[in-house]
Amino acid sequence: MLTHIPKEICRHLHRISQKSWDIVKVWGHHISVECQVFVANEVQTNQDRLKELFQSITADSCPNTYNFHLHTHHSDGRLHPQQLIQQAIKTGLKDLAITDHHSVNGYWLAVSYLLSQQGISAQPLPKLWTGIEITSILLQTNVHILGYGFDPNHAALEPYLQGTAPTEAKGQAQQVISSIHHAGGLAVLAHPARYRRSVKELVEGAVQLGVDGIETFYCYGNNKPWHPSASQTKALAQLADQYGLLQTCGTDTHGLDIHQRL
Ligand SMILES: [Zn+2]
Ligand SMILES: [Zn+2]
């Protein structure tokens, strides 16, 4: 059935398959189907839809309807991508992104698992967007920049998918943001109230570099149940309003429950 697999996708599959036997097994079984479906649905990033979705986010969106900040064991999280997706399906999450540090391997495995559930799952399947979290320097401060809805095979992202933080010029926020844009994605300043510099300065600095949004809704105290921190949310929402920024939410899950940070 499969007549043609675009070269860059198979190069990518080859590259990640050398890193983990786990992936070899998964892709080994599904490679033709995966490639076809991937080509049809995933390479064509849909920035407008993602923007609309981000515009609809409120303090109540995460963690039960959306979650745009999740880690797997392909960076410093504990969940296998398949477990993460199983929880997302079970709890009826609508849209999500896996935002591992400097890796999209977890994303690929999650796509693979989601595809294997098409037509099988009794519950609706969530929409999985591409995601990444990149350590960057903004105003001489170490920050994290999230990328969403990009083409994971785009050459501009290659330096940021190596499993380690980018160095020198590649690590400057300006370069990170423009690389995400080149790959067709949106760039968002992660948890802006968690750094060694004021929220106002960092958000304004990021705006100057063309950032698309900020992670307004974030639980700084790791409370249970998860909820966006009130005072930080208020300050960030005001800045977002002032600069016309998109606002996102996410649990920044590193543990075993996608509704909590840890
Ligand atoms: Zn972070
Ligand atoms: Zn994170």
Image: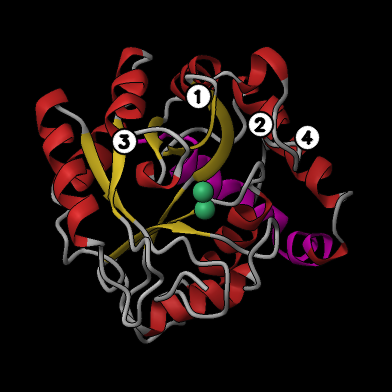
Which residue type does callout 1 highlight?
Ala
- Going from N to C along the chain, the mark reached first, 2 or 1, is 2
Q: Are marks 2 and 1 in contact (CB under 8 Å)?
A: no
Q: Which residue is mark 2?
A: 160
Q: Is the Cβ of the residue at disc 2 closer than 8 Å to that at disc 4?
A: no
Dots 3, 2 in contact, CB < 8 A? no
Q: Identify residue for label 4.
A: 11
Disc 4 versus disc 1: nearer the observer: 1
Residue in view at x 62 percent, y 64 percent = 72
- Residue 21 lies, in percent from the top left, at 87, 63
Of mark 3 and mark 1, the one earlier in the sequence is 1
Residue marked by disc 1: 183
Residues at marks 2 and 1, CA–CA distance in whole angstroms? 12 Å
> Front-most of 39 and 86?
86
Q: CA distance from mark 3 to mark 2?
A: 25 Å
Dominant secondary structure (helix, strand or loop) of the stretch shown in magenta: helix
Q: Which residue is mark 3?
A: 199
